[in-house]
Image (cartoon, rainbow, N blue to C red):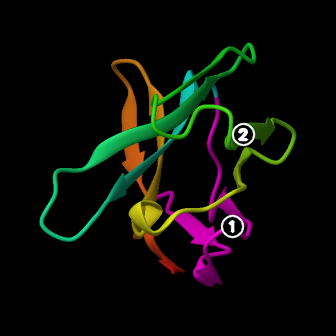
Amino acid sequence: QVQLVESGGGLVQAGGSLRLSCAPSGSIFSINVMGWYRQAPGKQRELVARITGGGSTNYADSVKGRFTISSDNAKNTVYLQMNSLKPEDTGVYYCNYIRSGIFDIWGQGTQVTVSS
């Protein structure tokens, strides 16, 4: 069925920026929420940011003011603009699309590494 494909991860120095993208490989419709999660080595996966179909957003306290989530609903694509990156932002970032009671789809993840 539908797969989500992330791009934009990589290695960046502290203080730098990256923009992550997530797009479906097949047809999808009526998405309620698009989100980004991350998992650092030895730590639990955590919510970074999410956006609803209506444009409402929320962020983890640790990234608020530095990261911005946005979407292009015509392309069913979600973005995460990450500025002022810190070493503690290092981890595998996953996108997630939800339609309540219908689907809950995860990408394979993209590595983000922030060096000192």
Query: Is-magenta flag for residue 86?
Result: no
Identity, as a three-letter code, of the amino acid under mark 2: Thr
* Residue denoted by label 2: 68
User: In the rendered image of this protein, does residue 75 appear above or below residue 64?
Assistant: below
* Residue denoted by label 1: 15
| x and y percentages locating residue 93 in the rendered image | 45, 62
| x and y percentages locating residue 51 in the rendered image | 63, 26
- Are circles 1 and 2 on residues that touch, CB within 8 Å? no
What crowding class fits label 1: few (fewer than 14 Cα within 10 Å), some (14-19), or many (20 or more)? some
Question: In this orientation, which residue lies closer to the viewer: 101 or 36?
Answer: 36
- Estimate the spatial distance between the alpha carbons at disc 1 and disc 2, rounded to whole Å: 15 Å
Q: Secondary structure at mark 2?
A: strand
Apparent side of residue 53 relative to residue 48 in the rendered image (left or right): right
Residue segment shown in magenta: 1-29
What crowding class fits label 2: few (fewer than 14 Cα within 10 Å), some (14-19), or many (20 or more)? some
Residue 56 image-quadrant placement: top right
| x and y percentages locating residue 88 in the rendered image | 40, 62
Q: Secondary structure at mark 1?
A: loop
Q: Which mark is residue 35?
A: none
- Please name which of the two marks, 1 or 2, marks the residue nearer to the observer: 1
**Residue at image location 38% in from the left, 55% down from the top:** 38
